[in-house]
Image: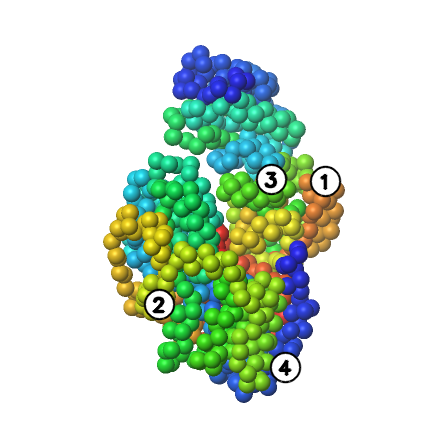
């Protein structure tokens, strides 16, 4: 299949891995203290586990699974607010599929649907707009979440709704911005992330410039990476080269998709519709300054919170859960006391178990049986894998 | 009845004249066979003719609630006949007789019911089966989703055939009869109004003619048709029943490019997609080539291929394109598309 198979070629992967092993061997890092590379995006996390990239890496390198899954970092209270809005009999509540099973304090949207709420899975906010046109007597609400990746299509949808003067369409705006989160992560004292794989989809919109502070202020190299295994291996190699050469810059491996300036049209639509709105709560990470997104005054009429005023429902995470520590590389998913017992994909307790993109969900799906041996030093696991193959 | 405005009414389920007319003009005319035409409460089947065909009676039932009712490659009626016939065929039986129960929603267009019943009749006839007894109920609008069909089927298993998941052994080969996920992809595209020009039809088909010759081979251990849950679910069933594991090779999985593309776009796995005309067979290594040849000689099995092997380690695993093996888990519920 074009644009897929050529980025999964085993022979090319082998060549890249040989180079990676050779380069990584020159790094002053050991298996006990590997070079920690944070893949920010949940899509990368999923690819790492799906293709077993972590098992192919040399022992001097280690992936840290970052906070880049918008479903995972959604606070419980927001889901409760969704359920409250969806319970209004006149409301058709539209959501992306993977938000359907995120647990709130009073259950998930899927459970709210079982109780009778009219909740529908859509593939785009434009599907919500169509529902609003088809159901003029109902109030259609779109649960707008996601990073810069999904903001443009929400923005364009609202521009269309405004042109059509639709009065029965609104959004529950839970969009968030990635860069403040990365700044917050790097500002914490005991977080040791050596380098970043930046998300290709966010970068497709933002371009490369917003990442420069990571190099300039925090001295960490960063590579914008695609999601196929060869993309990721090449990106890791680029990072290792930077580290080996003591250089620190933002590089773009995903040039076939990510223009240097990003998508200017999308940026314009986002500026017209959205504004940064101060602090925002992230599940597992707490409050992060200037990371929340709200509607500009020109689009405030599409804010569902104006129409239904859902109660703010702050809900503390379970104190035993170590989501924040997993997100910042301080521990691995299986080291959380809830992993695989109180927290599974069927009954997610913590943030990262919820979406298939979450680090814990990916670990559970692909590594669950290996959890018992996962506490061994990584180089031993590496040897075992090599023998198996 | 041919006019689009004619719809199912509560009278069609009343037991009165309207119901008799529906049965006479639609069901009896379409299914037309000597057992049904006797119009008794139950079909009267000759025990002598059954026992002449084999030693075991295979008996199965299934219910069909698919949305949408019509899809590329078939409709709910064809699906009901194929599904039940295939459940019999994979147990080694020759499917012979079917029952069918209809639950109709008030307001369902009669012309659509006609299309469904006609295709059911044709599918059954083509596969040498007879629909010999049935039932019709009508429920008020909103109490059901257009039409539900229940079918039960009986067939006879020859004495020499003893296919069972418990017969699976380490070293056996795992074979699929064709491309994975065609039905699931075609339905998802329609149901979710994705509007993709996939060019993929449901693989809905009666597998009995392809499976029948396999009964003469030695070394067939177990067969299943991979419906809901896809091939992944069947592999887990085989593993649980036998106590052995199965390791499949991702690169060996036959998947149409359009189905693979849809899965890549939505973050889903073709292994979890439903099929309605594919069989998964576990066979002794010495029988592998003969099974493949026999399957490929039938149009329904022309893409048959070996996808994996039964292992001692009781896990279902997938060896990926880069050579890394990972455990293959069953999704807890229907997989949901990812946000980005």
Which SS class for mark 3? loop
Distance in Å between CA atoms under marks 4 and 1: 52 Å
Residue ID for mark 4? A22
In the rendered image of this protein, does residue B262 appear above or below residue A196?
A: above
Q: Chain of mark 1?
A: B
Q: Are marks 2 and 4 in contact (CB under 8 Å)?
A: no
Q: Residue A226 location in percent, x, y?
A: 57, 65
Identify the disc placed on residue A290.
2
In this view of the protein, can residue A6 be seen by the observer? yes
Residue ID for mark 3? B202
Mark 3 and mark 2 on one chain:
no
Distance in Å between CA atoms under marks 3 and 1: 18 Å
Residue ID for mark 1? B298
Q: Hey, which residue is sitting farthest left in the picture?
A: A311
Q: Nearer the viewer, mark 3 or mark 1?
A: 3
Task: Tally the marks.
Answer: 4
Between residue B56 and residue A16, name the one nearer to us.
Answer: A16
Distance in Å between CA atoms under marks 2 and 1: 64 Å
In the rendered image of this protein, does residue B294 appear above or below residue A175?
A: above
Q: Chain of mark 3?
A: B
Residue at (30% x, 57% y) in the render: A77
Distance in Å between CA atoms under marks 2 and 4: 42 Å
Mark 2 and mark 1 on one chain:
no
Q: Left or right? Give the position of B80 relative to B141.
A: right
Of callouts 3 and 1, the N-terminal one: 3
Q: Nearer the viewer, mark 2 or mark 1?
A: 2
Q: Residue A230 location in percent, x, y?
A: 62, 67
Residue at (36% x, 56% y) in the render: A295
Q: Chain of mark 2?
A: A
Residue at (66% x, 28% y) in the render: B126
Q: Residue B137 location in percent, x, y?
A: 43, 24
Between residue B274 and residue A312, name the one nearer to us.
Answer: A312
């Amino acid at each position: 299949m074009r644009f897929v198979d050529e980025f999964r070629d085993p022979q090319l992967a082998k060549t890249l891995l040989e180079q990676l092993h050779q380069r990584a061997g020159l790094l002053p890092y050991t298996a006990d203290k590997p070079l920690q590379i944070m893949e920010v995006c949940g899509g990368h996390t999923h690819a790492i586990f799906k293709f077993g990239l972590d098992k192919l890496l040399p022992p001097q390198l280690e992936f840290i699974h970052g906070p880049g899954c918008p479903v995972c970092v959604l606070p419980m209270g927001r889901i409760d607010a969704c359920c409250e809005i969806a319970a209004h009999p006149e409301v058709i509540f539209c959501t992306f599929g993977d938000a359907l099973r995120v647990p709130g304090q009073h259950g998930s949207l899927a459970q709210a649907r079982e109780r009778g709420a009219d909740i529908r899975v859509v593939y785009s906010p434009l599907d919500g707009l169509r529902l609003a046109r088809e159901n003029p007597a109902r109030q259609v609400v779109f649960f707008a979440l996601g990073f810069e990746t999904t903001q443009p299509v929400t923005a364009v949808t609202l521009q269309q709704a405004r042109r059509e003067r639709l009065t029965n369409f609104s959004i529950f705006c839970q969009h968030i911005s990635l860069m403040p989160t990365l700044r917050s992560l790097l500002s914490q004292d005991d977080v040791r992330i050596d380098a970043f794989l930046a998300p290709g989809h966010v970068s497709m919109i933002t371009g490369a410039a917003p990442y420069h502070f990571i190099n300039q202020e925090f001295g960490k190299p960063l590579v914008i990476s695609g999601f196929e295994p060869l993309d990721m291996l090449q990106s890791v190699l680029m990072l290792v080269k930077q580290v080996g050469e003591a250089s620190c810059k933002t590089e773009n491996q995903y040039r076939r998709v990510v223009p240097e300036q990003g998508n200017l049209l999308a940026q314009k639509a986002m500026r017209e519709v959205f504004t940064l709105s101060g602090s925002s709560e992230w599940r597992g990470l707490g409050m992060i300054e200037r990371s929340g997104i709200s509607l500009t005054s020109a689009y405030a009429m599409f804010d569902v919170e104006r129409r239904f005023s859902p109660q703010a429902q702050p809900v503390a995470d379970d104190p035993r859960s170590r989501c924040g520590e997993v997100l910042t590389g301080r521990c691995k998913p299986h080291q959380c006391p809830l992993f695989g017992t109180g927290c599974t994909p069927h009954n997610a307790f913590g943030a990262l178990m919820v979406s298939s993109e979450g680090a814990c969900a990916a670990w559970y799906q692909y590594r669950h049986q290996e959890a018992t041996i996962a506490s061994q030093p990584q180089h031993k696991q590496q040897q075992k894998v090599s023998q198996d193959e | 009845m041919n006019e689009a405005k004619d719809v199912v009414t509560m009278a069609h389920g009343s037991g009165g004249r309207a119901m008799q007319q529906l049965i006479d003009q639609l069901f009896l005319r379409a299914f037309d066979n000597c057992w049904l035409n006797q119009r008794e409460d139950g079909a009267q089947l000759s025990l002598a003719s059954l026992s002449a065909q084999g030693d075991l009676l295979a008996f199965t039932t299934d219910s069909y609630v698919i949305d949408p009712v019509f899809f590329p490659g078939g409709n709910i009626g064809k699906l009901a006949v194929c599904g039940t016939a295939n459940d019999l065929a994979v147990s080694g039986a020759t499917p012979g007789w079917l029952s069918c129960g209809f639950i109709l929603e008030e307001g369902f267009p009669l012309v659509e019911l006609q299309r469904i019943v006609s295709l059911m009749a044709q599918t059954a006839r083509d596969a040498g089966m007879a629909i010999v007894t049935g039932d019709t109920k009508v429920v008020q609008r909103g109490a059901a989703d257009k039409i539900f069909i229940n079918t039960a089927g009986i067939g006879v298993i020859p004495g020499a055939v003893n296919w069972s998941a418990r017969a699976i052994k380490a070293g056996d080969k795992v074979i699929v009869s064709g491309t994975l996920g065609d039905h699931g992809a075609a339905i998802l595209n329609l149901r979710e109004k994705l509007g993709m020009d996939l060019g993929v039809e449901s693989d809905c088909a009666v597998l009995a003619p392809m499976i029948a010759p396999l009964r003469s081979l030695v070394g067939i251990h177990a067969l299943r048709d991979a419906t809901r849950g896809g091939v992944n679910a069947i592999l887990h069933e085989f593993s649980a029943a036998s106590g052995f594991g199965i390791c499949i090779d991702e690169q060996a999985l036959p998947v149409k490019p359009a189905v693979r593309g849809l899965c890549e776009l939505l973050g889903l796995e073709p292994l979890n997609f439903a099929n309605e005309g594919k069989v998964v067979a576990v066979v002794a290594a010495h029988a592998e080539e003969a099974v493949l040849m026999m399957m490929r000689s039938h149009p329904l099995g022309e893409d048959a291929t070996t996808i994996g092997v039964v292992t001692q380690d009781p896990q279902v695993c997938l060896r990926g394109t880069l050579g890394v093996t990972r455990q293959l888990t069953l999704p807890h519920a229907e997989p949901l598309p990812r946000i980005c």
